[in-house]
Image (spheres, rainbow, N blue to C red):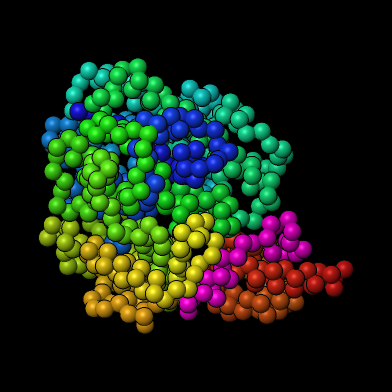
Amino acid sequence: MRAIVLMFDSLNRHMLAPYGDTFVDAPNFARLAERAVTFDNFYAGSMPCIPARREMHTGRYNFLHRSWGPLEPFDDSAPQLLGEAGVHTHLVSDHPHYWEDGGATYHTRFTTWEFMRGQEGDPWKGVVEPGTSAPGIHRMRRQDQVNRRFMRTEAEHSQTRTVDAGLEFLETNVGADRWMLQIELFDPHEPFFSHQRYKDRYPHGYDGPEFDWPEYRKVTEPSDQVEHARSEYAALVSMCDHSLGRVLDFMDAHDMWDDTMLIVNTDHGFLLGEHGWWAKGVQPWFNELVHLPFFVWDPRCGERGTRRTALTQTIDIAPTMLGFFDVRPAPDMQGQDLAPVLAGDGPSHDGALFGVHGGHVNVTDGRYVYMRASDDERNLPLDEYTLMPTHMRTRFGVDELAGWEPAEPFGFTKGVRTMRMPATSRWMNPWRHGTLLFDLESDPGQERPIVDDDAELRMLQLLARLMRENDAPASQFQRLGIPADGEITRAHLHACAHRERADALAEPLPSSTDLAARDLLERPLTELLRDPAARDVVERHAPDLVHSELLSVSASANLLNLAARAAIPASTLHALDAGLAALLSARR
């Protein structure tokens, strides 16, 4: 028996033909659906990229205990368990996060592995130019432009080179038995870099600035720029579809369908203006981000061209892969082997947790989605539990480590005590967005959160049960304002109390081109407040920005940027725009 996992990053379910009408040209995904089982109710768990991969290895949630980080010493890894059982596992990927501090223990769990460089500002090609030492995202964007110079043709693109390497493994081992190949593509993750033949599939009139790498914030761009970004994303999905077709062609040409499992999956989606947002992570985890495409061909049952509605998740991938090779799942794995579901008679989960460390804790039962926000504005207490103290690209700072304490073992740490230290949610504060409840039956687009005490109570009880089964730390229960033990009652409900704040922050922002006082709204706030009249306008409509919030914003922050990052709601931005426009008019 052999298995192939073809994994994409940030692949949107709703933009693929097997899941509905779409403008995206991706015929090989339709072809895949004819050869496999299509899952209609498959959800993410821990997010974003590397936390999702930890779930693929361990078959269990991790976002309640720690943020982005490596596999822990006590973690069971499905590729390693397969290797120990005599199954050769091979990873080919262009996913740059495996090379960083926070991903360094994943690829080494495979028997063999190889990487292609060049994605998303990967520090790959050394070209010394002005801007080389620019900080953060500016350095990444500059490096990405350098990397693209070395991928001028489609054959040189890191996606193409990764698939080439995967096909080379298949060509070399097509006659061998007991192996698992994971072809893991970073695309269609931003930036949306593809070559012209894919862009040509999406003709549109646009003469604005280059825009294939949206920031993680609310949409303030004009509509033509938004549509341009959607076209750039679609072009990259079409390139991914071509890569999928290359794998399907190989399986056809070598008659591999009789004994080779195929799994095609992703970690999460990417918002392209839906709900007024770009990207992921800084807003609630809407279904566009967490309701995922998932396809499986299992030669044991031979089901193809069919669909399954069972509620399933990323945590199910590890036990499914282990079961296919008759390897017993680790006791700590919470996922289920999907073989019975694929055969048409398996049970589904009654609930699925999902989220990011420090964000909403979310749960769905397949009909309702419940997003539980923190109990107060500080979004505390929040702790990290780890023996591998690294973030995405950095080690934990000395200041973070100075106050660590040994924690009592969790049920999955095999008797080992981890480090416990206070954490901060740097990217998001769920309190601002409020606790949200959606009924997907009446509102599949999650456009109208509801207040329904009976439904909220059921979903909160389900959330608390799953948290307890996950051995969530007491601090998470405290942060959400629910008891770690004992009964969940109506006194713990939040949706009604949070409704006004949630509605205010959910309102989309106007395009920056429609703002009358755009120049002042984009002026650094510290500079703007030195103007007494402008300061009066800001103090009248956003007094916290004058009296306290400046302690936590950067020197370059401006009012439009703060609104885009959900620090102030759209109604406040409109009021500030009107007040500052009146000020400008009076000075003319």
Q: Judge whether residue 429 is colored magenta.
A: no
Q: Is residue 494 left or right of residue 63?
A: right
Does the magenta stretch mainly form a helix, a strand or a loop?
helix
Q: Is residue 382 left or right of residue 533?
A: left
**Residue nearer the viewer, 95 or 437:** 437
Tell me where residue 257 sits by quadrant. top left
Expressed as whole percent of the image width and height from the top left, the position of residue 280 reads 48, 54
**Residue nearer the viewer, 230 or 531:** 230
Expressed as whole percent of the image width and height from the top left, the position of residue 157 reads 48, 28
Tell me where residue 565 sits by quadrant. bottom right
Expressed as whole percent of the image width and height from the top left, the position of residue 529 reads 67, 73
Q: Is residue 577 left or right of residue 417?
A: right
From where the camera sits, is residue 265 visible? no
Which residue lies at the image location 32% right of the left edge and 66% below the top edge?
Answer: 463
**Highlighted magenta segment, given as a residue range:** 496-521
Q: Answer above or below: position of 446 versus 333.
A: below
